[in-house]
Image (cartoon, helix red, strand yellow):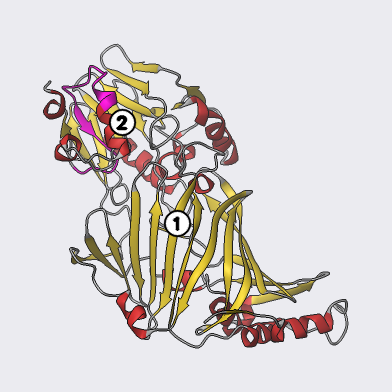
Amino acid sequence: MMKKTKGIGMLALIVAATWGTACGPDHPSAAQVLRGAIEGAPMTGPFVMTARGTLNQAAELQGSRPGASDQASFTETLGVTTSGAVVYEMDLDRIDGSREWVREIHEEDAKTLYLLEDSLIIRLVDHPELGGLERLQRRIPALLLREVAASPDSATRLAFDADTARIEWTSPEGTPLTLVVGPGSFLQRVEYSQDLPALGPTSVTWRFDDYRSTEAGTMPHRYSSHIGALRFLEMNVLDVSVDPSGIESLTATPEGFEGPIEVDGSESPSARAEMEELGPGLYRIRNLRNGFHPLIVEFDEFVAVVDAPTGYPLMLEIPPGDVAPGPRPDWLSRIMRNMVADHLSKPIQHVVLTHFHNDHAGGAPALAGPGVTVYTSPGDSTGVRRMLETFGSEGAVVRAVTQGERITDGTRTLDVIQIGPNPHTHEMLVAYLHEPETLFVSDLVPGATAADLMGEDLTPTQAFFRSWLGRTPFGSARLFTMHGTEPVDLEALTGG
């Protein structure tokens, strides 16, 4: 049973008693404010919280176009088990018509992933992303406040204004966070800045309100998150339970899943990256990060690359982790640049950005510069120029491809083709190499096999691709995608 909290809680009493006396001797310390907040919103132990709302894919540059509002239906479950593990489950109806379902179990020494797309279980050990346990727990105000109270030396400042108190705290990851508490709703906001691929330093704000008493303690029943000026997440809590059977069911293996496959994550996410030759002067870097295989085309005097990968910030955590953590947002494309230089000893002069999603375009600053042409869709060109300026990569020519552009040195030819609106993005580029005949479509049909594309139960993007391919002369090419491990012989689809 839930009921809306009517009282203002211990925190409110402490803060209200000292409003306007910020410089006086009775002004409370950060520790006092935190103790009051914890007493005002106690937690009783293991719990499961389920919430439903919307996630704006455009806010994290994963939507249809820059600046759009691409609201997708989103359900998430967050729980803490009796053993202290944190379980997180998300179910997203993506704007391209596909469904993304993932379950994560975070323990002190391992992270287990349940992936619906492959019905696969992966267990990561000694992995740099094991901090997800703490970063997810911070989504619950009482657990975040407990963590801050347990490290008082990191709470460096306490400031008051008319109706809020602001506590400055540096997380163990080294990110400065501001916790904003108020007299009527306990912890109101968490604010910080994050250096994001394609965006640069960006403000992130989490808001919590509508606190109610539950079996697990006092918890907010509305919460939201903003990335810059765009609302990223807007959620309403459906249920908070302490039922042991519900909590433990979150760790049970779903029917039909295989595994777990254990992966040693102690190496860098790019440690397995290798330059693979696909044909004369044609390469891809396999596993620049796990599941990312960008295309490399060698000409007589220069090189063209298709897409500029980065990691992927996990914006549902506080502060975000990354699936491929590194020293800067474009570091994976820096590794790609160095691998091209080591293997081919030629400069990268052409960079094709198939679409302006952060993990496919965010590495462009590492590749752009004087003498480099960056190809992008017209609707993405403003965002690409802004990104290059933000990261200090001036000098490159940004060319908006309305229909097609040709990269050639007289001996070999790479066509850059605009395919227009599609279920994945508003515009998208693909690359076609004349010899050996090769078509690269990035993640328009991620990881698809010939059997997938020949079936009747096609996803919206697969159906779009089949229709588009039937209107082109590319039916005898080999198809490569960013995320697919093996090429697809298109003759099997088109008959040659």
- Residue 358 x %, y %: 46, 44
Name the image quarter holding the C terminus. top left
- Residue 306 x %, y %: 35, 32
Q: Is residue 469 magenta?
A: yes
Residue in the foreground of this view, choosing between 189 and 215: 215
Would residue 164 appear left or right of 454 to someone viewing this image?
Answer: right
Q: Which of the 4 image quarters holds residue 283?
A: top left
In this rendering, does residue 129 appear at all? no
Neighbor class of circle 2 (other Cα within 10 Å; few <14, some 14-19, many 20+) is some
Q: Which mark is residue 429?
A: none
Give the mark, 1 or 2, whose residue is nearer the N terminus: 1
Neighbor class of circle 1 (other Cα within 10 Å; few <14, some 14-19, many 20+) is many
Q: Report the Cα–Cα distance between label 1 and label 2.
A: 25 Å
- Residue 264 x %, y %: 25, 66
Residue underneath mark 2: 464
Residue in the foreground of this view, choosing between 135 and 142: 142
Judged from this view, the residue extending furthest toward the top is 410
Amino acid at dot 1: Phe
The vertical placement of 29 against 70, above or below, is below
The vertical placement of 232 against 440, above or below, is below
Tally of marks: 2
- Secondary structure under tag 2 reads helix
Residue underneath mark 1: 74
Q: Which of the 4 image quarters holds residue 483?
A: top left
In this rendering, does residue 437 appear at all? yes
Tell me where the magenta segment starts and ends, as one range: 467-485
Amino acid at dot 2: Phe
- Secondary structure under tag 1 reads strand
Q: Please identify the dominant SS of the magenta region.
A: loop
Residue depicted at x 36% and y 79%: 247
